[in-house]
């Protein structure tokens, strides 16, 4: 008795899935690539903005820290901090 090979059934199903995905990518998928590129560009812009804001905040905090340290060191001689 010939029994169907379960591995052959699985590979046939996977091959069919791959064929459908390739056909989809050739027709409708072209706009998906453009959309992905747009998302990458938007993400890069947002990341650059966040990095710039982070640097500005860090710089401001460092300046305030230096000012406070100077006031603490000069606390015995100066009262205008």
Image: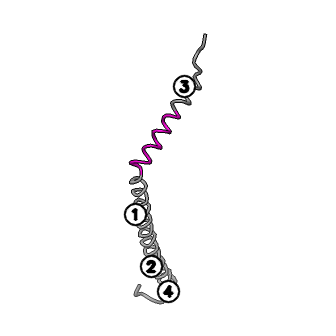
Quarter of the image where the C terminus is located: bottom left
Which stretch is magenta?
14-29
State how far apart marks 4 and 2 are (Cα).
15 Å
Q: Earlier in the sequence, mark 4 or mark 2?
A: 2
In the image: residue 20, left or right of residue 10: left
Residue wearing tag 4: 74
Q: Position of residue 23 (x, y in %)?
A: 44, 43
State how far apart marks 3 and 4 are (Cα).
83 Å
Q: Is the Cβ of the residue at disc 2 closer than 8 Å to that at disc 1? A: no
Residue wearing tag 1: 42
Q: Nearer the viewer, mark 2 or mark 1?
A: 1
The dot on residue 9 is 3
Q: Residues within 10 Å of mark 1 (few under 14, many from 20)?
A: few
Q: Residues within 10 Å of mark 4 (few under 14, many from 20)?
A: few
Q: Earlier in the sequence, mark 1 or mark 3?
A: 3
Q: Earlier in the sequence, mark 3 or mark 4?
A: 3
Q: Nearer the viewer, mark 1 or mark 3?
A: 3
State how far apart marks 1 and 4 are (Cα).
48 Å
Whether residue 58 appears in magenta in the rendering, the answer is: no
Helix, strand or loop status at disc 1: helix
Residue plotted at (45% across, 89% down): 78
Residue plotted at (38% across, 54% down): 31
Helix, strand or loop status at disc 4: loop
Helix, strand or loop status at disc 3: helix
Q: Is the Cβ of the residue at disc 3 closer than 8 Å to that at disc 2? A: no
Residue plotted at (40% across, 87% down): 80
Quarter of the image where the N terminus is located: top right
State how far apart marks 1 and 3 are (Cα).
43 Å
Whether residue 24 appears in magenta in the rendering, the answer is: yes
The answer to which of 80 and 29 lies nearer the viewer is: 29
């Amino acid at each position: 008795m010939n029994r169907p090979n379960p591995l052959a059934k699985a590979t046939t199903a996977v091959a069919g899935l791959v064929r459908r995905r390739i056909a989809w990518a050739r027709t409708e998928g072209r706009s998906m690539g453009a959309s992905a590129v747009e998302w990458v560009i938007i993400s890069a812009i947002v990341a650059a903005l966040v990095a710039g804001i982070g640097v500005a905040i860090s710089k401001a905090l460092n300046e305030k820290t230096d000012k406070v340290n100077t006031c603490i060191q000069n606390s015995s001689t100066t009262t205008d901090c």
